[in-house]
Image (cartoon, grey):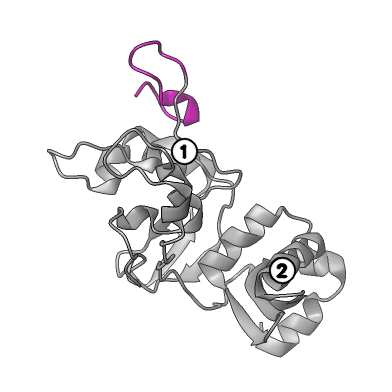
Amino acid sequence: MQGIGSEAIKCQNCAAQAIPSEMPCRYTMAFDHERTLEVTVGKKSLQDIARHASQYAVLPAASQQHSTFLLGKADIAALLTRMRPFIGNMGTTPAIHMPHSHNCGHFGQLLLRAPHQYRLEQAQLQARTDGHLELDSVREGEEAAPIQVIGSGADLNAATANGLQRAARLLDMSVDEVKNRVTITGAVEIGRAPGLVTVSLLAPLKQLEKLGIAHLVKGQYGL
């Protein structure tokens, strides 16, 4: 580790950048002392957090890991929501022996022909159950208001992708940012099988004002 940011993660043999994975839209959240509210941190404050990543992450002294705080990512700033702790990895058990952190579609791929004891073949990968209980519900904030976007498609996967894309076009932001905002402040709920969902999230009021619908949302929620 040399410095902060994605470029700080380097190979100890050749010093080449060696970050294991990149995400196009990242955020970091801070909590109040009562642990009732949380807000995404801006770039200025995150610089200090990144420089003291282990301290802010409260890592044990003997811990052999590095906190993702050192990446210093603040792609979404000042997004407020109510804190509701939950167990993210609570869920179903895979049919074969694999790390629980890889029991899902995207990380499970990393086990394919891996050079360690948890190596899997493509057929074995079908035994994963994607049992990560990472759910939340919409919350109101000071500079944002809850909205819902309808997604439809041939099946629920297509409907969800459609709903996220519609929300991204409506709010003039990337699909990755919409996904993060839905994760923090909203939900994707099944409206009707085989392919209709509602995508809920807190949308920035300035975006709703540009669309000419802020007065409708404010009237609905008494903002």
Q: Is residue 114 magenta?
A: no
Q: Which amino acid does label 1 sit on?
A: Gly
Q: Where is residue 215 in the image (x, y as percent from the top left)?
A: 80, 80
**Pick the front one: 26 or 110:** 110
Identify residue for label 2. Answer: 158
Query: Farthest residue in the top direction?
Result: 14
| Residue drawn at (44%, 59%) of the image | 104
Q: Where is residue 100 in the image (x, y as percent from the top left)?
A: 32, 58
Query: Farthest residue in the front direction?
Result: 123
| Residue drawn at (33%, 41%) of the image | 67
**Pick the front one: 124 or 219:** 124
Name the front one of labels 1 and 2.
2
Secondary structure of residue under mark 2: helix
Instruction: Decide which of tag 1 and tag 2 comes sooner along the chain.
Output: 1
Identify residue for label 1. Answer: 72
Q: Image check: 151 left or right of 157? A: right
Split into 4 quadrants, where in the image is the C terminus? bottom right
107, above or below 135, in the image? above
| Residue drawn at (43%, 46%) of the image | 121
Between marks 1 and 2, how big is the CA–CA gap?
33 Å
Q: Position of residue 87 (x, y in %)?
A: 32, 69
Q: Can residue 222 be seen in this view?
A: no
Split into 4 quadrants, where in the image is the N terminus? top left
Q: What stretch is highlighted in magenta?
A: 1-16
| Mark 1 neighbour class, 10 Å CA radius: few under 14, some 14 to 19, many 20 or more | many
| Residue drawn at (32%, 68%) of the image | 93
